[in-house]
Amino acid sequence: MVALTKGRYLSLGFVFLVYCTTCTKSKGATGDILPDSLPSVPGTLPHFLKEPEDSYIIKSNPIKLLCRAVPALQIFFKCNGEWVHQNEHVSREYMDQNTGLKVREVLINVSRQQVEDFHGPEDYWCLCVAWSHLGTSKSRKATVHIAYLRKNFEQDPQGKEVPIKGMIVLHCRPPEGVPTAEVEWLKNEELVSSLTDDNIDTRADHNLIINEARLSDSGNYTCLASNIVAKRRSATATVVVFVNGGWSLWTEWSPCNVPCGRGVQKRSRTCTNPAPLNGGAFCQGMSVQKITCNVLCPIDGGWEKWSEWTACSVQCERQRRRECNNPPPRHRGIMCEGPSNATENCTGGMCTQSMDGSNDVALYSGLGSGVIVVAVLVVAVMLYRRSQSNYGVDVIDSSALTGGFQSFTFKTTRQGVADRAEYHAPKGHPPETFPRGLNRDYSNSTVERRSTKKGLLTPNGPPLTPTKDQMRTTGVFGHLGGRLVVPNTGVSLLVPHGAITEDTSWEMCMVINQGESSFQTEEGCEILLGPEVTYGPRGLDLSSPVAMTIAHCAEVDTENWNIQLKRKTQDNSWEEVMSVEDESTFCYCLMDSSSCHLLLDQPGSYALVGEPLTQAAVKRLKLAVFGSMGATPMHYSLRVYCVDDTPYAFQGVVATETSRGGQLLEEPKMLPFRGNTFSLQVYIQDVPQFLWSIKPFTTCQEFSFSQVWCSNQKPLHCAFSLERNSPTTTQLSCKISVRQVKGHEQILQVYTSVAESKKESVPFFTQTDCTVTSQAGPKAFKIPLSIRQRICATFDTANAKGKDWQLLAQKLHLDRNLSYFLKQQSPSAVILSLWEARHQDTGDLDSLASALEEIGKIHSKSTAAKSQEDPESDLVHHLGTGSPGNPVCGMGELTQS
């Protein structure tokens, strides 16, 4: 063994140092460690001022481990049980200014390769060993790891829909990593902190807990995981905090709806406490309650018999009296009219009461003066008539006698503008002369009519003035009748043959109100089932009823609906005419699946109104989807319309989309909408996400129940805005789902090209000769006039089996409310008019011919000989071969223009 100042033996990872006490005092040949560099405090174990710390290798960058001890002769690192070679140590020694002791510091580098090559049972570790005169000390073990963070989360948070004040728990398990990733939460890209909001807890296992959900807590939530290597974002979870609707308090009961007798009281409530939000459920139950009420009817007072006359008084008068007690007025009844006391002279004017002489003088003086005045007047009149007789004729204004018999005509100056009626006097009369009772103001009436009959027809109501919010059609009709149709609205008016007297013609009009409906729903119960229709003029006087057809949107069911016909009064309020299930002698109503046919005697404004009796009441909705380019070439807009299923209501959609340049992308479909108080939801589905993107929170849109139920023929729509991810995308395919909560669902399939330079026009409802809105005379009817007259002559005559027109009504399935036909001058003519209105679109005369055959009155034989013997035997032949006339615009078919 060689004596050295410092001996090092490194063999098999073990270092053995031998210090020679005799050599420490001599100068070493090598000079590695000087005597004055050794600790000055002998007998003390080394004390670590700094121990190695756990470290992480990021990517390929090595880490540094540092040890610092005092007093220490030497410091070496030991990693994974083996000594680190001294060449890998970097040592430094310096004097501590505070203690005056020499401090030794040693540093080593650990590379990623060293850690990866280690395959021991433990993690890669290192510690320090420090020597002093007394012995050695060991530091703590410091582990070395390779830092990383994987890309995929072990659990992504999931979107939720929670009620308000409910608990929200979003789970997040971050990706595996070393060191373990820290988790933060973002809401709409802003950091969520539990320090500033006591309602939020982010400390439990990386989960986000919101103890009581608020509306402001709705949003997009993201879990953010990070460590010293990287940051990772989870999938976004959409949280929707919804509010279920709650009923408000009931209103007070309304007054009884009848002035007396049995009636109905109502009270209502609204789903506003709170109103449903963010897809929350609409209130369950009915919004209106009804109870019966009884109001005592007023009893007007009645006079008792007069009492006996009293004895004649000294004033020559007697009296009698009576009391208002037969019966007395009760319950707001009217008091008796007339006097309760009566007085009369009881001597026949020969009163025996004495008068003084002065009164006699005055009486006779007055009588004498009266006689003289009368005589003077008689003489004056005789002289005047004698002087006038020199002319040989009495001067009398003959126009006053003949004016009431002068003919006149009203001419329309311009269609669509307030019309002017002009009076045309006979030849030889000055233009300033007007018939008796017709003043100059009447020439400004907006009533449009022509008359050629000797006589005066005066309207008895205010004229009809069209406005910009009205669809209007007019026609001039005479004794042969005709038909008016508002194109593509399902509204028409049939004026039967003979309704207008001979030698008379009327310019009739029919108007559909397009503005805000004047009909107001009664506490949310009643809704319009079709458009408001007016026909006139109001002064129209017809001998038989007209047949009006109005399309409606109700699924007709008497157990679930109470459907009424209402008419507008002079003060713009609406009064009930009849319920469609009632029988009436002044109006007739026939409900088909999609149209209502009315027989009306009086011009005016009419509307079909429905009141749901149960939640099973259904009205039909028409669904349509239109598309057009957006604000930029990269954007495309889809618009989904929900409108009452009537042709008139859909025309509003067509007009709107025509002005926008929209394209109908799918054939419109029908959706039954129940009166169950649940909302209507519209979803867009199956949008190719790699081709198109859509704005967040817009994939589902919702209409409240009241919006849809009380739309009153006005269209509702929602829009979806899509953006192309690439300009090369030319096709769009997706599905539009429209469904009522706890109701029916309908799917609209969209497949369209968005790159065409010229879009096709919007398809609209049309039919052959759609410009024909008015037809007069025989061509307006399906049944030839001669056949119609022969049918009426046959069936209006009674026989031993009863009234034959009743059999006709039965075979034509018009056998309800027969009392209405009974009061008509020609029941068969009215029945045929109703049949014409019901079959105006089909023009099928076979059903009428079959009905006549079944009755047994006519036979379908067409031989000429038989026709000569029996004039009625060829009716069936004529019905089968006769021209039904030119069609007019009806409901229409969907065609591409």
Image (cartoon, grey):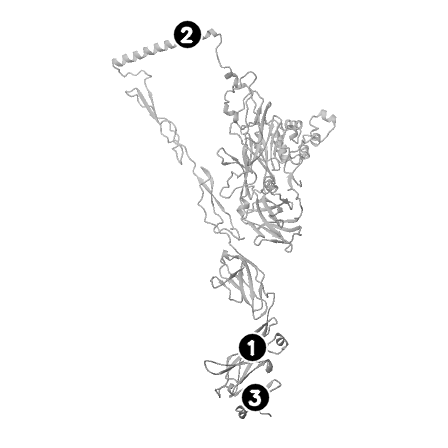
Q: Distance between the residues labelled 2 and 1?
A: 154 Å
Q: Do the residues labelled 3 and 1 touch (CB within 8 Å)?
A: no
Other-residue count near label 2 (Cα within 10 Å), few / some / many at <14 / 14–19 / ≥20: few
Which residue does the image show at 70% across and 32% down from the upper left? 880
Dividing the picture into quarters, in which one does residue 364 lie? top left
Element type where label 1 sits in the image: strand
Q: Distance between the residues labelled 2 and 3?
A: 178 Å
In the figure, 698 relative to 69: above or below? above
Query: What type is the residue that disc 1 sits on?
Result: Leu
From the viewer's perspective, is 552 left or right of 379? right
**Which numbered tag is attached to residue 6?**
3
**Which numbered tag is attached to residue 65?**
1
> Where residue 37 appears, x then y in whole percent?
51, 85
State the residue in front, 569 or 436: 436
In the figure, 251 relative to 225: above or below? above
Of badges 3 and 1, nearer the viewer stands 3
> Where residue 205 appears, x then y in whole percent?
53, 67
From the viewer's perspective, is 260 left or right of 827? left
Query: Along the polypeptide, which appears first: circle 2 or circle 3?
Result: 3
Does any portion of residue 801 appear in the rendered image?
Answer: no
Other-residue count near label 3 (Cα within 10 Å), few / some / many at <14 / 14–19 / ≥20: some
Q: Distance between the residues labelled 3 and 1?
A: 25 Å
Q: Find disc 2 in the rendering and name its residue.
A: 383
Query: What type is the residue that disc 2 sits on?
Result: Leu
**Which numbered tag is attached to residue 750?**
none
Query: Along the polypeptide, which appears first: circle 2 or circle 1?
Result: 1
Query: What type is the residue that disc 3 sits on?
Result: Lys
Q: Do the residues labelled 2 and 1 touch (CB within 8 Å)?
A: no
